[in-house]
């Protein structure tokens, strides 16, 4: 492999961009300009759990692939937890991914989507944080008026209401100000094929090297997706040599950040994509930058910011190494 170029891409989508409830097919964004949303309800009875949330999302058309009890992991690793309950989950809708990927390959930045499910001792509420329509559009640079992205946001809204009956969106007032920061980190490269090798072989070699570099640094990949084989080809589409995404998480990042910002699960685990179209020699790799966390959640404590930026620097170095 030889590195072709490395690009930090700044997504200059206006923060105020949103769609009215009428135009957005009844997708309501009560926090205009906010890129995440927190849905909350009283759970004094304890009837709502991670399992009931999974069931509600599945019944609403969203597949929940992973839902990890982070308190169990944190207590073993750090002998400490920040919240009464804390789960990180990833979810998707294949039909909408299929529609969006044909128009905007950047939907891989949100394949899968992430959410956190959490409660604490001070209140009897249970909360779910996800990206809003505005936030989904902002990261991917997909227009917020795209009907399929709107439908994705609508499905999330339906699932949230089903998971937390009588729930409400909490008012948010984060000082979202990132119009000049890189919201995605993207690379382009070309794969040099071995004699008799295929692009699928080269991608697999990339994947193996990526995982071997990430693991010693404390990163985990709870789920990966072969969208070309498992989604595109099964629906009669053959535009790509490969399209994969990886859900990546680092405990040393989410642990300090989640103390004051449990809603950070809207961004974690994060999705990294790699794809190559058949009519193009260029291999595209990208993931959402940590500036999404810092700016969209108004994070100010140095420990969290240091952990986030250090994590990003590690991934950038690894991708530089494996694309050389």
Image: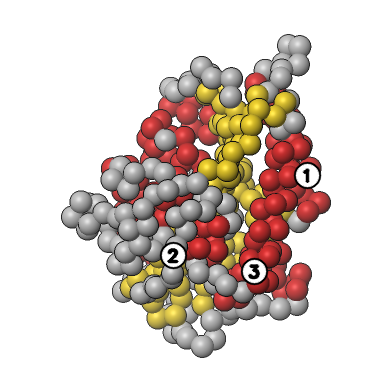
Rendered view: 297 above or below 12: below
Q: Which residue is mark 1?
A: 213
Rendered view: 268 above or below 48: above
Q: CA distance from mark 1 to mark 2?
A: 33 Å
Rendered view: 91 above or below 274: below
Q: Which mark is residue 275?
A: none
Q: Is residue 92 visible?
A: no
- Quarter of the picture containing the C terminus is top right
Q: Which label's residue is closer to the chain start, 1 or 2?
A: 2
* Residue 195 in which image quadrant: top right
Q: Which residue is outermost to the bottom?
A: 122
Kind of element beneath mark 1? helix
Q: Which mark is residue 176?
A: 2
Q: Which mark is residue 304?
A: 3
| Residue drawn at 39 percent across, 37 percent down | 100
Taking the image as shown, residue 243 lies to the left or right of residue 133, namely right
Taking the image as shown, residue 61 lies to the left or right of residue 288, namely left
């Amino acid at each position: 492999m030889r590195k072709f170029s490395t690009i930090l891409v700044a997504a200059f989508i206006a923060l105020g961009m949103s769609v009215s409830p009428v135009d957005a097919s009844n997708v309501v964004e009560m926090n205009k300009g906010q890129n995440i949303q927190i849905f909350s309800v009283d759970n004094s009875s304890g009837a709502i759990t991670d399992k009931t949330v999974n069931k509600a999302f599945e019944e609403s058309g969203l597949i929940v692939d992973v839902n990890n009890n982070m308190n169990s992991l944190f207590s073993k690793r750090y002998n400490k937890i920040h919240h009464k309950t804390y789960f990180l989950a990833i979810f998707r809708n294949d039909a909408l991914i299929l529609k969006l990927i044909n128009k905007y390959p950047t939907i891989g930045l949100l394949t899968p989507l992430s959410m956190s499910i959490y409660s604490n001792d001070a209140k009897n509420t249970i909360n779910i944080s996800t990206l809003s329509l505005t936030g989904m559009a902002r990261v991917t640079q997909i227009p917020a008026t795209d009907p399929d992205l709107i439908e994705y946001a609508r499905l999330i809204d339906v699932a949230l209401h089903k998971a937390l009956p009588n729930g409400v969106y909490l008012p948010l007032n984060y000082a979202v100000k990132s119009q000049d920061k890189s919201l995605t980190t993207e690379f382009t490269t070309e794969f040099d094929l071995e004699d008799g090798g295929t692009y699928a072989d080269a991608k697999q070699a990339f994947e193996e090297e990526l995982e071997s570099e990430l693991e010693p640094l404390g990163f985990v990949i709870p789920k990966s997706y072969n969208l070309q084989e498992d989604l595109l080809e099964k629906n009669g589409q053959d535009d790509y040599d490969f399209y994969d995404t990886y859900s990546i998480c680092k405990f040393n990042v989410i642990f300090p950040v989640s103390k004051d910002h449990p809603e950070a699960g809207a961004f974690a685990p994060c999705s990294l994509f790699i794809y190559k179209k058949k009519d193009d020699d260029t291999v595209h790799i990208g993931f959402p930058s940590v500036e999404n966390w810092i700016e969209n959640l108004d994070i100010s404590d140095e420990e969290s910011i240091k952990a986030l930026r250090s994590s990003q620097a590690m991934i950038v170095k690894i991708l530089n190494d494996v694309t050389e």
